[in-house]
Amino acid sequence: MSELRHFRNHINGEFRDAADGRTTEVINPATGMPYATAPLSAAADVDAAMAAAEAAFPAWRDLVPGEHQKYLLKIADAIEARAEELVAVESENTGKPLGLTRSEEIPPMVDQIRFFAGAARMLEGRSAGEYMEGMTSIIRREPVGVCAQVAPWNYPMMMAVWKFAPAIAAGNTVVLKPSDTTPASTVLLAEIIGEILPKGVFNVICGDRETGRMMVEHPTPAMASITGSVRAGMQVAESAAKNVKRVHLELGGKAPVVVFEDVDIAKAVADISVAGFFNAGQDCTAATRVLVQQSIHDEFVAALVKAAAETKTGQPDDDVLYGPLNNPNQLKQVSGFIERLPAHAKVEAGGHRVGDKGYFYAPTVISGLKQDDEIIQNEVFGPVITVQSFTDEQQATEYANGVEYALASSVWTKDHARAMRLSKALDFGCVWINTHIPLVAEMPHGGFRKSGYGKDLSAYGFDDYTRIKHVMTSLDG
């Protein structure tokens, strides 16, 4: 244990161990071996972090928006300057390829922080006016207060940005908990941000689900925000209800990828396979549920199998598209879906673990599936693309909407009118047309139904961290 690195909580500008000294091991999923420990934070640690955030809130809230912007721009510059260090830390903790982490995560993170730096100065409200004789009404947009935030393990570094950037831009203070399997980059972000922000504005505590539960149930936060599973979201909503907290939930997904017969099959397959296998399919918006028009089904599946055969997984420093699954439980979950496939399903490619070290899983394609099959209805969160066929637009829509998740979707066709009809009919928070998975800071990300509520990114995401106050004044003096 003496050879392992040790991560620490960051509370009120200081790094500290858990009050009771308890820790958990942090595993490198590319090797399956522990390389560090992190605090297993309990009630005393949650109390300390909440007290620090609460004490820092009045002064941070009262800064003019331009000052919030300056701090955020400094954070973006600092992250950019320490990009290589962040990439190395993130890759070791998640097994992600170094090159793709450098190119696909750091630039969006920096851009998103800079976007919210600008949003800090755009606290819009309806104009003042007289709606009752002799009275003027004014709308104030204010921060909500202390925010308890829980980030997931699939994009630890980027999801931390999605959490803290809009919250502090709006004038809130934050207590953020990374996943217990991926605390490394969030702790490094705390070091970087701690050198810039006033003490107590941004606090990080490590821990497990119980730590997260204590954060949500704590009386101090005015808002709880989580990115995670549907089960976790339901538990957070239930816990937050005890104190009538505002809740922001970004939960699971089962994105339909609806492919019509008029597409360029080679191009569609090339794009969809990347969007399905990227990050080992560990993405709530991953293109892993493909619906293909019957007339091109066989040709499409054959091309997808070829793409899977050409897709590489491996160690972070190799030239690969994706690395390992995050943890042994996730490997067990993905393997379980394949083991439980019904007799009518056909594994066209993959369907097995790769190697005996780490948690790697082969790019997998499965055909012959029916709408009510488990693997169609439930989120796999692995490099597994399923393929169903449909006959017409009506059936495509029925199959696409026939799951409980409603986060993202895509339509692939050259027919503009059809694309517009489907974009209206699909019951998902995002509809891409002839592409899948690109995100920009200016546009909202969030779902409907069991995919949660609230938005990340965009002015809508910024609004979620504010509250509306009506001020009415008499004109009589």
Image (cartoon, helix red, strand yellow):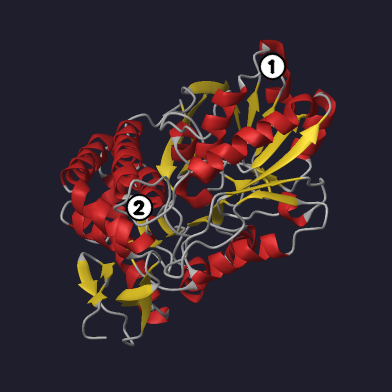
* Whole-percent x, y for residue 27 in the image: 37, 72
* Whole-percent x, y for residue 90 in the image: 31, 56
On the question of residue 257 being in view, the answer is no
Which numbered disc covers residue 262? 1
Which numbered disc covers residue 125? none
- The CA distance from mark 2 to mark 1 is 39 Å
* Whole-percent x, y for residue 271 in the image: 52, 31
**Mark 2, residues whose alpha carbon is within 10 Å: few (<14), some, or many (≥20)?**
many
* Residue 404 located left or right of residue 73: right
Quickly name the residue at label 2: 157
**What residue is shown at x 55% (from left), y 58% (from top)?**
245
For the residue marked with disc 2, what is the amino acid?
A: Met
* Whole-percent x, y for residue 61 in the image: 31, 48
Q: Please tell me whether mark 2 sits on a helix, a strand or a loop.
A: helix
* Residue 112 located left or right of residue 347: left
44 or 343, which is in the foreground? 343
